[in-house]
Each structure stands twice: as C-alpha cells, then as structure tokens.
Image (cartoon, rainbow, N blue to C red):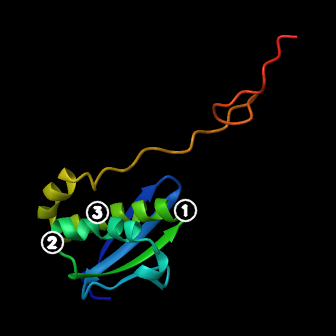
Amino acid sequence: MAATEYIATGRRKTAIARVRMAPGTGKIVINGRSFEDYFKTLALQNSVLRPFEIAKTLNAFDVKVNATGGGVTGQAGAVRLAVSRALIEANPEHRAVLKADGLLTRDPRMKERKKAGQPGARKRFQFSKR
C-alpha cells in the first residue's frame, strides 16, 4: 500500500477490527476475502460503507481489514467504527459529520457474565417452597 496509510481499530461486543486505509480506488478486503464475499447481506455491507457515504469519500480509499472474534454483525460494527476513526485520521474535518451520525460511538453493550448459583446471567434455578 501507499506511504500515507491510516491505521485504526474498532470494537463491538467481542469483535475486533484492525483497519489499514490508503488512498486508492475503493477496494475493500476483509481477512483476505472480498468485501461482498465476507459480508453477504446488503444491510451489513451498507453498515460498513456508511462512514464513506457520510464523509463523501466512497471510492477514495483502499481498505484492508483484519477482523477477529464475535459474529458477522459484531465484526461489521467493529469495521464501521474502525473505518470512521481512520477517516478522521485522514481528514479531521470529517469528525463533525461522522459524530453527528453516531459513527464514532463505541457500542458499550456486552454479554452479561454468568453468576454463581444461577444457570445463566439472569435466569434462576426453579424455586421450590416444599
């Protein structure tokens, strides 16, 4: 890739996405696979492309992503955050529009831990009076 490379990290649930972005033609590669092949549904694809649409830089960057952990939806959210952060690194003027659309907010929702003496996080074992 080019000398001007922007690196950013995004997380969602247990998914982590490390993004390397360089000026180019809009080619997106995730874990060595094409973007359309990795995120099959249109909703996930649009989610990842949203930061580019908001910043009006749709085919301005080549993106290489390393996504690990979680499921496809979590990974898509992680990629979206990482791309948003990389766009700000590339041009700080994008910050206002990306922030207004909520693309810079790390989704804090995580799986609640299982508690001792219960079968799950909230579920209790059946209560018997007698």
Q: CA distance from mark 1 to mark 2?
A: 28 Å
* Badge nearest the viewer, 2 or 3: 2
- Name the residue located 33 percent from the left edge and 68 percent from the top edge: 46
Looking at the image, residue 62 lies above or below residue 114: below
The answer to whether residue 89 is seen in the rendering is no
> In the image, is 84 to the left or to the right of 128?
left
Dot placed on the residue nearer the N-terminal end, 2 or 3: 2
- Name the residue located 42 percent from the left edge and 75 percent from the top edge: 65
Furthest residue in direction right, as rendered = 130
> Looking at numbered disc 3 in the image, what kind of residue is underneath it?
Arg
Look at mark 1 in the image and give the residue it sits on. 71
> Looking at numbered disc 1 in the image, what kind of residue is underneath it?
Gly
Residue 24, position in %: x, y? Answer: 24, 87
Q: Are marks 3 and 1 in contact (CB under 8 Å)?
A: no
Looking at the image, residue 35 lies above or below residue 109: below
Residue 10: quadrant of the picture: bottom left
- Name the residue located 49 percent from the left edge and 84 percent from the top edge: 32
* Badge nearest the viewer, 3 or 1: 1
Helix, strand, or loop for circle 1? loop
Instruction: Specify the label residue 56 is tagged with.
Output: 2
Residue 31, position in %: x, y? Answer: 49, 79
